Image (tube, rainbow, N blue to C red):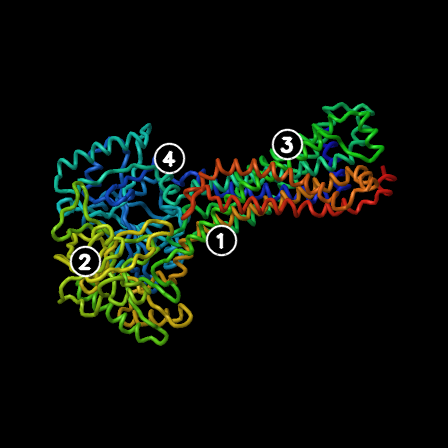
Amino acid sequence: MDTVWKDMRYGWRVLERNPSFAVVAALTLAIGIGANAAIFSTVDALLLEKLPYAEGNRIVLVWNTDPNRKIQHGAVSPAQFLDWQEMNQVFQSLAAWQSTSVTVAGGGDPEQVWSSHVTANFFHLLGVQPMLGRDFLGREGRPGQERVALISYALWERRFGKDPGAVGKSILLDQQPYQVVGVLPRSFSLFGTSAALDIWVPLAFNRTQLDREDYELVVFGKLKPGVSPAQAQAQMETIVAALKKQYPDADQKLGIRVVQLEKDLTDNYSVRPTLLVFLAAVVLVLLIACANVANLMLARAASRDREIAVRATLGAGRRRILRQLLTESMLLAGIGGALGIIVAFGGIRFIRATLPAGIHEIPHTSSIQLNGSVLAFTAGLSLLAGIVFGLVPSVQISRSELGESLKEGSRGSTAGRRTNALRSGLIVSEIALSLLLLVGAGLLIRSFVRLMSEDLGFNPSNLQTMQIWLPANRYAQDSEVRNFYEQVLERSNLIPGVQVASAVNFLPFTHYAGGCDFDIVGRTPPAGEEFTARYRVMDWRFIRAMGMRITSGRDLAPSDSTDSPGVVLINEELARRYWAHEDPVGQQIRLHVPQTLASWEARQREGWLTIVGVVGDIREWDWGLAKLPSVYLPYEQNPSRLMSLVIRENGTVGQIVPEVRHIVAGLDGNQPVTGVRTMEGLLADSLAQRRLSMALLAIFAGIAVLLAAVGIYGVMAYVVMQRTHEIGIRMALGAEPKHVWRMVVREAMSLAAIGLAIGLVSAGLLVRYLQSQLYGIRAFDPITFLVVAIVIAGVAAAAAYVPARRATRVDPLVALRYE
């Protein structure tokens, strides 16, 4: 240890004598190590960190699937859930969850919050205990005994001021009294997002009143010890097949899917492939940084040959010299790692600030931070980097011949051809890796530009949105619901600065939509399939408010009321799918109206509906996804308690929000207005993940190209210094400056050409893994490859320009006298 300490002290003195080298090398390493630490912290939080539940690897989700509608996350009916509970042998327990919106009163002003209805065993399945009070009791899952509630820590803090006496008090949920029996822990988040689920009440089923096609539940399961998800999948498929035979009138097309909760969360947001691309990118950046530092150390070796030779003459063996040089490398890596923590801290803040928010929020992003595992990773990475960039130069220096070193040292020269070959190889690798990163960034940028240039089908500018969800106990009659929204829209249209105010149940880019099967008059669907579409319920002014197009037929009108014949609009995708060679206007369809409606669903009109118009397709679910067949139903004929106001303003968006709130409060003082967002804000959130991917890869590629340019510059500057004598002789014999300039640039470009060739081949083999991140272009895009190659070649030429110019200014007399 005493020897190691002496080596470290000596290494520190060596760095002090070469501050410019130490600063450049440490900053280069800090960038590479810090970028890796920032991305690792993201990978650790989103992929490696286990769910905060007891035995979380055994918790699964059980979904209905529907191949006809391409649904992989279908809700489950209460009747299905109860049958699965009774028939399965693979789950330790099954629990159900559904969410709705409620108005909370008592303990403060009324507010609308998200409420979760869960089976009484839900928190026991997760292994979550209330912070205060108790969990639900088994009997509270029976009809008539479910008027109890668990509340979130945030609601307890907001409405009860953290009063422990809140347990046992009564609160009003949609004007119905519920007793608070417990407060959930502050850290609890069901899906790991910031979305607030403030109220939890028991689900109570009455089996005699259940509809097998009332799909409204998300089913959680906890596997028995030793049972795998694949085994559970196999048994559940057997159970589903048996239930189809038992209930032939139920939907025979439904399948089932058992998936681990942890896997479902990452797969649903396409997190895994994106993070793996980032991880590969930052590893390449670190390799380039290490190559650069190795080149710097080889250059510095020129001034240390004589020192090493003297140490060897005084008795130091090669192993001792190698250990000293590696100690210096590790010390430099430690400094780079310490600075890398600062870079990582900034990188983490950047990532968290640019991650999607709202409904597009990725689970567990709040866990992205500099924790113990990230710091340990940073320390290990610094150690590895020290070995990587320090080993080869150290071995190279320690192997130098004593006599040659003393002889060369007396001449002020450097190591020979072997060192030059090594430096050239490092530069070639830097160029190849930089090209690989720049190709990836270029593909993502071109994809993003394609995405942004796509026609949305509507105009998002100056559109303000907000949501209203009327409670069923206060608005039980359809006429009450219609009357409320009619008054809100009539008064909103009179607000100064409002061009048009309208309403729709499901906004684009909110990941909410209703699905419906339907009949077409005179047609029968293919065997095993249904005519199917998404549906929206809208006010007659909605098309105009959104700036959408009617491509044939007419728009909805005020005359499409409850007393008039049923009408419907369809989009172009639906027209292409079912009326490819005829005009759909005037055709009739009939929706399959469910017997039981979820709280968010519209009461759809029964009977035949006449198609009166075709609407242009809009981008409504997410960027880059296929257009969905959709029907648009008039609100007057299909009332919905859940509606979003869509208001196009003349001036600054958002100015009318207080006035709309005042209108709603004047009609119902207990009715909150929520979800206040601009349409452009919704679009920005939906693009946030793609934008972050593009930005990070572009930053990594930019760093890589900069490091490669610095490396080329350093090598060529070193070559010019090394060949000063040769250049002096050439110029003394009549070589013109332009010939010397070409010689130096040609040497640099030959290295660049080799790097470009290797990089292009590597990129051609690897970019296919980016295809899932791209839109509108192929992974092997010739334009991107060509542009990137030209850019890298230009950077290499620019980096070689200054050393080449310096070579042309060598004075032959001075060079010969120096040598």
Q: Which mark is residue 57?
A: 4
Q: Earlier in the sequence, mark 2 or mark 4?
A: 4
Label 3 SS = helix
Q: Are marks 4 and 3 in contact (CB under 8 Å)?
A: no
- The answer for how far apart the CA atoms under marks 2 and 4 are is 40 Å
Of the two numbered discs 1 and 4 on the same chain, state the one appearing first in sequence.
Answer: 4
The residue carrying pointer 2 sits among few (fewer than 14), some (14 to 19) or many (20 or more) residues within 10 Å by Cα, namely: many
Image quarter of residue 491: bottom left
Question: Pointers 1 and 3 in contact (CB under 8 A)?
Answer: no
- Judge left or right: residue 732 versus residue 43: right
* Proximity of marks 2 and 3: CB atoms separated by less than 8 Å: no
Q: Position of residue 153 (x, y in %)?
A: 39, 52
Nearest-to-viewer mark from 4 and 3: 3
In 3D space, how far apart are the residues under numbered discs 2 and 1 (Cα atoms)? Answer: 41 Å
How many C-alpha atoms fall within 10 Å of the one at disc 1: few (<14), some, or many (≥20)?
A: few
The disc at residue 387 is: 3
Q: Is the N terminus in the top left, top right, bottom left or bottom right quadrant?
A: top right
Q: Amino acid at mark 4?
A: Asn
Q: Nearer the viewer, residue 773 or 790?
A: 790
Residue 670 seen in this snapshot: no
Mark 2 sits on what residue? 603
Q: Residue 5: name its quadrant.
A: top right
Residue type pointed to by label 3: Ile
> Label 4's element?
helix
